Amino acid sequence: MIDTGYSLTLSCPNRPGIVAAVSKALFARGGDIFSAQQYDDVEHGLFFMRVLFTLPDGGDHYQPLQADFTAIAEELGLRWTMRDRTRRQRVMIMASKFDHCLADLLYRRRIGELPMDISAIVSNHPRDTYDGLDLSGLPFHHLPVTKETKADQETALWRLVGETGTDLVVLARYMQILSDGLADKLSGRCINIHHSFLPGFKGARPYHQAHARGVKVIGATAHYVTADLDEGPIIEQDVERISHADTPADLIRKGRDIERRVLARAVRYHLDDRVMLNGRKTVVFRD
Amino acid sequence: MIDTGYSLTLSCPNRPGIVAAVSKALFARGGDIFSAQQYDDVEHGLFFMRVLFTLPDGGDHYQPLQADFTAIAEELGLRWTMRDRTRRQRVMIMASKFDHCLADLLYRRRIGELPMDISAIVSNHPRDTYDGLDLSGLPFHHLPVTKETKADQETALWRLVGETGTDLVVLARYMQILSDGLADKLSGRCINIHHSFLPGFKGARPYHQAHARGVKVIGATAHYVTADLDEGPIIEQDVERISHADTPADLIRKGRDIERRVLARAVRYHLDDRVMLNGRKTVVFRD
Amino acid sequence: MIDTGYSLTLSCPNRPGIVAAVSKALFARGGDIFSAQQYDDVEHGLFFMRVLFTLPDGGDHYQPLQADFTAIAEELGLRWTMRDRTRRQRVMIMASKFDHCLADLLYRRRIGELPMDISAIVSNHPRDTYDGLDLSGLPFHHLPVTKETKADQETALWRLVGETGTDLVVLARYMQILSDGLADKLSGRCINIHHSFLPGFKGARPYHQAHARGVKVIGATAHYVTADLDEGPIIEQDVERISHADTPADLIRKGRDIERRVLARAVRYHLDDRVMLNGRKTVVFRD
Amino acid sequence: MIDTGYSLTLSCPNRPGIVAAVSKALFARGGDIFSAQQYDDVEHGLFFMRVLFTLPDGGDHYQPLQADFTAIAEELGLRWTMRDRTRRQRVMIMASKFDHCLADLLYRRRIGELPMDISAIVSNHPRDTYDGLDLSGLPFHHLPVTKETKADQETALWRLVGETGTDLVVLARYMQILSDGLADKLSGRCINIHHSFLPGFKGARPYHQAHARGVKVIGATAHYVTADLDEGPIIEQDVERISHADTPADLIRKGRDIERRVLARAVRYHLDDRVMLNGRKTVVFRD
C-alpha cells in the first residue's frame, strides 16, 4: 500500500470544519479515502491530518484537486503536501566507516520493502571501504572531508542533492556533523540515526557512557537533522535490555541491531508520508 | 480525556462519502471533532470509524444529533453507537480464588485511572476470600456454582446484570466457563483475561504447558467472551521473556503481572470506546 | 525458592582458585549447591559470585561454615555475606502522596510473592492519605518534614530503622531527598524508584520533560540511594513505547505501571540476594 | 570473548561435589575460569554447567586436561564437550527463495560479529536467485529437490556435510522438510528458524493464520531440528506488536525482521557454547 494512490498531509490551527472541508473537496473530485489519521495537539491548538486516497481512472483529476486545495489551504491557513505515491522517492544515503545501516537499507530496497530509488551513495571514505556490499548499479560518490575542506565538501554535497533530484537524505551512521547552513537547507528531509537513546547519552561513544553508568537498557534514536545534532525532532526510538555482563563491545554489537531497525522504520515512515513536523517534535501516524 | 465529550463509533460496507457525510452531520450541529480514527478493512470491504467530539454549551444538541444519525445510518447501512462520555459506565467484576486482577482494577478505579462505577463484584467464592482487599462500599455478591446449580446461578447472574444496570462484565480470572447462552447475551460487553498467550496454549494450566514446551516468551490475552472460551475476539495481548531457569511457579508469578496489565488495558480501551468488533477479530483504535 | 536454604555472595580481586576454594569449603560441611552464578569484571579485575545451597538436616552446620568462611575470606581478600534465606527480611516502606508503588508492594507481599515482613510504613503524609488501602496490622508512622525539621525527622527515621530491625528501606515514590548522611548510613540497603529513565530525564517532572522532548519511549529506574539522588547504582529499568498522542497525563499513567513493576523487581532481586554493588554500578544475577 | 580460550559444557544427574570436582580438575592444570554458569533442573534432578577458561601459555595443557576429564566423566556419569574456542566452527547455511536470513548471517560474519567459517551455502534454487548478495569466495551448491529425488538429494547433502567438515547446519528459511533420518543424524547441530511464534501457529503460512485470528503479537522461533519439524527444542524466540491495520503482507515484512534477529541470536548462542539440550527443551546460558 505504501506505493499506491495519493497522500495528503496537512496541519493548521485547529477549528471546527477542517475535516468536513477536506472530505468534501476530495469527494468532489471522486477521491476515495482508504486511510486517514488525524491528531489534535490540544496543548498548542494545532491540527494534523494524513489522508491516503485514490482518484478515478481516466481523465486528470489530480491537477484540479491540487488547484482546489490551494484555494482551501489559503482559506483555512493550511500547511499541506500532496503526493503521487506511485512515484518513487529518490534517496541519498550517506555513510562513513560502519556500514550496517547502509547494508540494511540497501537490502530492504532490493527486496522491495522500501520503495525508493537510490539517487546517490555518498561517503567520506573510499568505495573499497564497502567491499563485500554489492553496490553495482548504484552511483557512488567519495566526498572526503577535512576541517579545511568541509565548506567545499558541503557545497559539492548540496549540488549533488540538486543534480540527482534527491528527495530525502539519510545519514546512515555518517560520522560527520553537517553545518548549520546545510542542516537548514535539508530541514525536514534529512534523517539521522543517533547511536544511542536520546536524551540519555548525547555526544561521542554513547555505548561506553551507558556501560560506565551501568544502565540496564540501551537504545537508538532516528531524528530529523537540525543545527543541534542531538536535538532534532525524534521520529523513532527502540531499546534492548542489557546486563552487567555486557561489555562495551557487546553494547556496540547489540546497538547495531537497534540502530538499523530504528533507522529503517524511520525511513519507511517518512516514505509512507507518516511523519509531520510539530515544532521540535514530530507527529508519526502509526496504524 | 477518557471522560470528556461524546463518542461515535460506526462500521459499514466501505464506499466513498462516508467520512464526508459524518463530518457534515457533526458540523451541522456544532460538533467539534477532537479525535478521529478510521480503518479500511480492504480484505472484507468494511469501514470502521471512531470519532470523539464536543457539542456547544447551552441547548440540547445531542438528541437532534442522534436523530440525524438515525437517518444517516439507515441511508448508509451503518452499525453505530453514540455515547455521552461524561456518564460513567457501570462495570461488574467477576472473580474466583485469585484476586490480582480484581485488586488491580479496583486500585486503578480508586486513583481515577479507570473511570467506571462498580455495579457489582461477583464471586463463586465467599467474601472473606478477599480479606486484605478493601471492598468497603462495593456491592459484593457470592454466587457459588456447582454443576447442578450452574443454570440457576447464571439466571441469578443475568438478573443481576439487569438490575444493576451493568454496561460491561469483566471476568477477572473468574474460573468458571459461561454457558453459550449467557455468552451470547453478553456479546461484545464481556471481557475475559486468558492467562496465556493465545492461540499458543489453550485450555488448563497454560503456564505448565509453556514450561513443558520450553518456550522463551509467555503472555496473556484479553478477549471478548464468546461461546468458544479460547476463541473470542482478541482485544489486547502482551508478553514477557522467560528462561530455562523459570519454574512453573515463576511463570505463574510473571504471568500475574502480564495478566493484570493486559486486562487493565483492554478494559480501558473498551471504556474509551476504542474497540469495535470485526467478525471474530477486533479493531482497536490506539493512538 | 526465594525463601529456601542459604545464600553466599562474595566479591574479590580475581585470581585462579576462588571457585575451587568456595566449592571445597561448602562441600566439606555437606553443603549442596542448587544455584550458582558468577561474573568476571575483566575491566577491573574483579570477581563476583552468588551461591545458593542447602545444609544437611540435624546438627549445626551453619555456624562452623561461617567460621570456615571467615578464614577463607581473610586469605582470599573476600567481601562476603552469608544469609539464612528462611529468615524473612524486614522491610520499611516509605511513601508520600502517590501510593501506587506502596499498594503494589503490599499486594505482592500479601499473596506471598515478596517474602518480607513490613517493619514499618513511613510517610510524610498522614495515614488517611491512604484510605482505600488496607493497612490493618501494619505499623504506620507519620513523620512530616519541613526544611526546618528535616534533620530531626531523619534522626527519628534512623532511630526507627534501628528499633524495628529494618533490613531494607524502600522509597516507594517517597518524594523527599535523603540527606547525604542518611544516604550513607543506608548504603546498599535503600532502594529508590526514579520515575523516569535515567540518565535521560533527571530532576523534577520527568514525564513533562519527556513529553516536551518528544521521545518515543519512556521508562523508570530502580536504584540504590546515594548522596547524588539520580546517580545511585541502577538495579533495574524498564520502558514502554509512547506516541505523539500521549499527553503528560498519559505518560504519568503509563509511568505508574512501569514504576511499580520496576520497583517490585528490584526489591525482589534484593530479597533474593541477587544484587551486588560494583562501584557505582551493580551486578544483578538474573537467571 | 566468543573466540577466546576453551569451553567446557557438561550435564549429569545432580549430586553434591560436581562443581568442586570440576573446579579442582581445571585448577590442577592451571586453568583460569573467566566465566561459569550452572543450572539445576530440580524437576528432573539434572545438573548443567558451562565453563569458559584459559590455560597457561607454553606446553600442552589441553590434551592432559581432556584425559583428566575423560576419567572424571566416567566416574560422575557426565555428558560433556570441551572445545578450543579459537578454532572457528564451520557452518553450512541452507536457503530457499527468501534470502533475508542468509543475507543477515553473511553480513554478521563479514563484520566479525559471528565468528564462523562458511563451509557451504546450499540451496534448492539456482545461484542467480541471490543476485544482489555478494557470494564471492563462498562455496555455493545448488541441490534441487523433488519428491522423487529427495532421498538422493539428502544423500548428497549428508556427504557434503562430511566432506566440508561442517560443524553446524543452519536452515535459513530453507523451505524443505528434512527426512527423519537426516534430522537424526544432525541432532543438536542443525538450527531452523520457524517463521512464527511456536506453538501458536504451526504449519504453513503462519502469518496468514495470525492475521485471521486477530492476534496482537507475532513472533519467530529458532530451534534445533528434530523429526517433528515444529517440535524441536526451542533456542530463542522474539516477538513484535501488531495491530488490526496490519495486512498479511505487513506481518510478513515485520516477521522478516524478527526471524533474522532470532536466528542470528540462536546461531550466536550455539557458536558461543551457550546451548545445551535438556530432553525436548534447551538450557541457554545467557549472561
Image (cartoon, coloured by chain):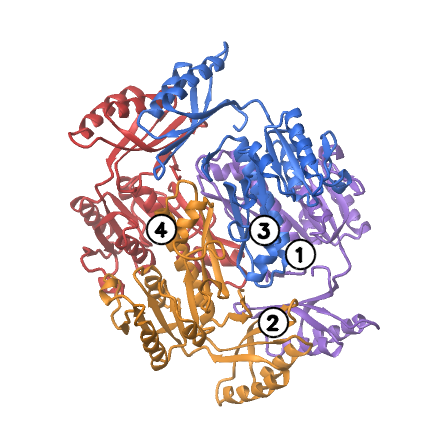
Chain colours: A orange, B purple, C blue, D red
Which of the two marks, 2 or 1, is nearer to us in this view? 1
Graded by Cα atoms within 10 Å as few (under 14), some (14 to 19) or many (20 or more), the crowding at tag 4 reads some
Residue located beneath label 3 in the image: C203
Graded by Cα atoms within 10 Å as few (under 14), some (14 to 19) or many (20 or more), the crowding at tag 3 reads some
Kind of residue indicated by mark 2: Pro
Q: Are marks 2 and 1 in contact (CB under 8 Å)?
A: no
Mark 2 vs 1, N-terminal side? 2
Quarter of the image holding residue C268? top right
Which of the two marks, 4 or 3, is nearer to us in this view? 3
Q: Residues under labels 4 and 1: Cα distance?
A: 41 Å
Q: Is residue B98 visible?
A: no
Quarter of the image holding residue B78? bottom right
Q: Residues under labels 2 and 3: Cα distance?
A: 52 Å
Residue located beneath label 1 in the image: B270
Q: Is residue D242 left or right of residue B104?
A: left
Q: Are marks 4 and 3 on the same chain?
A: no
Q: Are marks 4 and 3 in contact (CB under 8 Å)?
A: no
On residue A253, which mark appears? 4
Which of the two marks, 4 or 1, is nearer to us in this view? 4
SS class of the residue under badge 2? strand
Q: Position of residue C160 (x, y in %)?
A: 67, 29
Which of the two marks, 3 or 1, is nearer to us in this view? 3
On residue B13, which mark appears? 2
Q: Position of residue C13 (x, y in %)?
A: 36, 30
Compare residues C105 and B151 and report the one nearer the observer. C105
